[in-house]
Amino acid sequence: MSRIARWFATLWRGRTAVIGIPYFWLLLFFMLPFLIVLKISVSEMENVTFKDVLTYKDGVLALSLKLSNYIFLSEDDLYVKTYLSSLRYAAVTTILCLFIGYPFAYFMARAKATVQPALLMLVMLPFWTSFLLRVYAWKGLLSDNGWAADAISAVGLDQLLYATGLIPAPGQLMNTPFSLVLGMTYTYLPFMILPLYSNLAKMDLRLLEAAQDLGATPWVAFWKITVPLSKAGIIAGSMLVFIPCVGEFVIPELLGGPQTLMIGRVLWDEFFSNNDWPMASTVAVVMVLLIIVPLAIFNKYQAESTEKRG
């Protein structure tokens, strides 16, 4: 083998390894578990075991799929409302994280280089404490006589929350849509700030100077230059917040109430309270499809638009 052929062989092996390892990881830890859950969702349960979907007997290969769970899921209003409620709460949390996180990320990216590490540490500081402890802390803060509850009542904000329907009565902040959204926004806000900061910190500031020289006001330059160039960070942060929020269980269980039913709590009930694994697997499969399919379509059109611009 010539030297050039050996070089191409080494390059090919390197590229194969770089591409193959992430795909192997996704296959092992996402696709394979998803196929197992999909198989359970279309299987018949017998006590603690499941019937085989594919059977071979007397020279006949038979495929038996139980689709009644999917039919029941589409016809039951409770599941449909729960899916829509999960998507609504996840979307509201994502929007709030974007409105709060974008100014903070912008300030971090424009701060002095000596100050940026300290600001970055402040964003990551909550990760030094257990996620469960932080949620429990909000439960104490929003309960009766809690610091946050007393402060909200003192300024009259609970009256506004009651008028908008976020709490059932003035002063009652726990186990409401308000406490649920507040807990999820607080928890997932760093996941929005970090991608935005990474994107904004790499932006060429000479573009803003050029826009100013051409007569653009700071506000126009922000909307015409900064926001479009930070679109990748906005999308990445929104996905990092929206996707886990849809299937969130701990925060709705601790901070939410009966009127804040989300699909994560339904999954828990089906698996561990009702012990109906096929139905729980069906709920999980539909939840994954609700997230993956729109995301895949979006990525497809995003790639096509990038190719057209190129």
Image (spheres, rainbow, N blue to C red):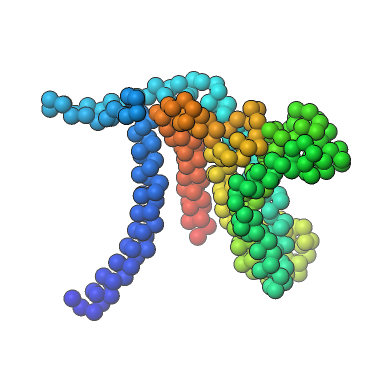
Q: Is residue 111 left or right of residue 296?
A: right
Badge count:
0
Residue 257: horizontal and vertical position, in percent?
65, 30
Seen from the viewer's position, the closer of residues 34 and 75 is 34
Is residue 298 depicted above or below 46 in this figure? Answer: below
Residue situated furthest left in the rendering? 58
Q: Quadrant of residue 219?
A: bottom right
Q: Is residue 232 left or right of residue 37?
A: right
Residue 272, visible in the rendered structure: yes
Seen from the viewer's position, the closer of residues 234 and 212 is 234
Which residue is located at x 46 percent, y 35 percent? 284
Residue 178, visible in the rendered structure: no
Which residue is located at x 36 percent, y 59 percent? 21
Quadrant of the rendering where the N terminus is positioned = bottom left
Is residue 216 depicted above or below 160 in this figure? Answer: below
Residue situated furthest bottom in the rendering? 3
Which residue is located at x 61 percent, y 40 percent? 251
Which residue is located at x 24 percent, y 75 percent? 6
Residue 149: horizontal and vertical position, in percent?
79, 40
Q: Quadrant of residue 135?
A: top right
Residue 170: horizontal and vertical position, in percent?
81, 31
